[in-house]
Image (spheres, helix red, strand yellow):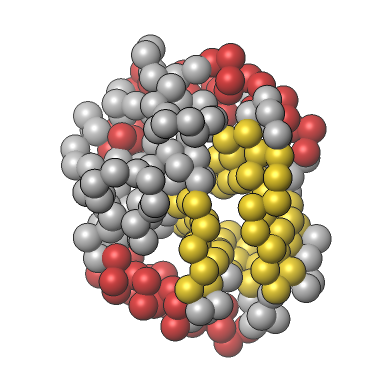
């Protein structure tokens, strides 16, 4: 069994970040002891180097291995360079136990809100997913921008500009899970055999309507995927339950 905590959209800054909520979330997630934490972008609010330095101190409070991809806010003000200096590679692949692969993609574009994967990164992702299909490995793709519009988020502006191509590759390769953030609204879509999950904001003050700060937890065993939505400091409930294809 594998347990993954999916967090997103911290927006570390002077005005948009709620430190009290973050500290409560850290306590909850550390008690959960997940196998890994996946952070789908917007670690900072403005991409400033000083925000990154502060964010790293916060992220170090998590006890489980953490893997992050950048968001649009992270790539402002030369933040794409700061991400590489202080966080790590902006796109990556990790494997667990030989049958579990997570692919992290950089969907950000410097000083722009739009999302874009681009051909070189797309071809690299496609190659990794080819191997997952051949080896019958459980596959996860993590990126900041959503590839399908999210309900109750107002006018659509920032879906990936090459979303159609990315969605085709993901669904034809039957990727098990796609994890995103960006809109600060939790949501699940299921297309063919692919479950596409959006996380809310872990600790930002930028919340829509009655949405609360939250994170997702995935419990994956040999037969099924259980997805839980955890409101920070509040209730936890089953968000979705799906059969594994392998």
Splitting the image into 4 quarters, where does residue 13 fall? top left
Q: As rendered, which of 173 and 192 lies closer to the eye?
A: 192
Q: Quadrant of the C terminus?
A: bottom right
Image coordinates of residue 68 in percent, x first then y, are 49, 44
Residue furthest bottom as drawn: 134
The N terminus appears in which quarter of the rendering?
A: bottom right
In the displayed image of the protein, which residue is found farthest to the left? Answer: 111
Residue 237 as seen in the image, left or right of residue 117: right
Compared to residue 187, the image places residue 221 above or below, namely below
Q: Residue at x 52, y 69 (%)?
A: 190
Vertical position of residue 199 compared to residue 96: above or below: above
Left or right of 9? Residue 131 is right
In the picture, measured across the screen, residue 166 lies left or right of residue 232, that is: left
> Left or right: where does residue 113 sit relative to residue 85?
left
Q: Is residue 209 visible?
A: yes
- Residue 84 visible in the snapshot: no
Residue at image location 45% in from the left, 77% down from the top = 171
In depth, the one of 70 and 211 nearer the eye is 211
Number of marks in the rendered image: 0
Q: Position of residue 155 (x, y in %)?
A: 24, 46
**Point 34% across, 57% down: residue:** 149
234 shown above or below 70: above
Q: Position of residue 212 (x, y in %)?
A: 53, 30
Give the quarter of the image for residue 79.
Answer: top left
């Amino acid at each position: 069994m594998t347990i993954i905590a999916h967090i997103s959209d911290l927006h570390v800054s002077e005005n948009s970040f709620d430190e009290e909520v973050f500290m409560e979330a850290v306590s909850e997630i550390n008690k959960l002891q997940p196998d890994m934490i996946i952070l789908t972008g917007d670690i900072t609010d403005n991409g400033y180097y000083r925000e990154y330095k502060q964010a790293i101190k916060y992220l170090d409070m998590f006890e489980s291995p953490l893997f992050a991809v950048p968001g649009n806010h992270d790539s402002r003000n030369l933040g794409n360079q700061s991400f590489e200096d202080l966080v790590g590679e902006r796109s990556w692949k990790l494997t667990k136990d030989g049958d579990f692969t997570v692919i992290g993609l950089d969907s950000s574009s410097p000083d722009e809100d739009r999302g874009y994967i681009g051909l070189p990164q797309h071809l690299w992702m496609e190659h990794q997913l080819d191997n997952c299909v051949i080896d019958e490995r459980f596959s996860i793709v993590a990126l900041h921008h959503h590839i399908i519009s999210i309900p109750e988020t107002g006018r659509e502006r920032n879906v990936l500009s090459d979303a159609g191509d990315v969605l085709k590759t993901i669904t034809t390769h039957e990727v098990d899970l796609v994890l995103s953030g960006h809109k600060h609204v939790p949501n699940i879509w299921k297309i063919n055999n692919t479950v596409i999950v959006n996380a809310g904001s872990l600790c930002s003050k930028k919340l829509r309507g009655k949405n609360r700060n939250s994170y997702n937890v995935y419990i994956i065993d040999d037969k099924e995927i259980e997805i839980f939505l955890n409101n920070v400091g509040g209730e936890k409930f089953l968000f979705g339950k799906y059969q594994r294809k392998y």
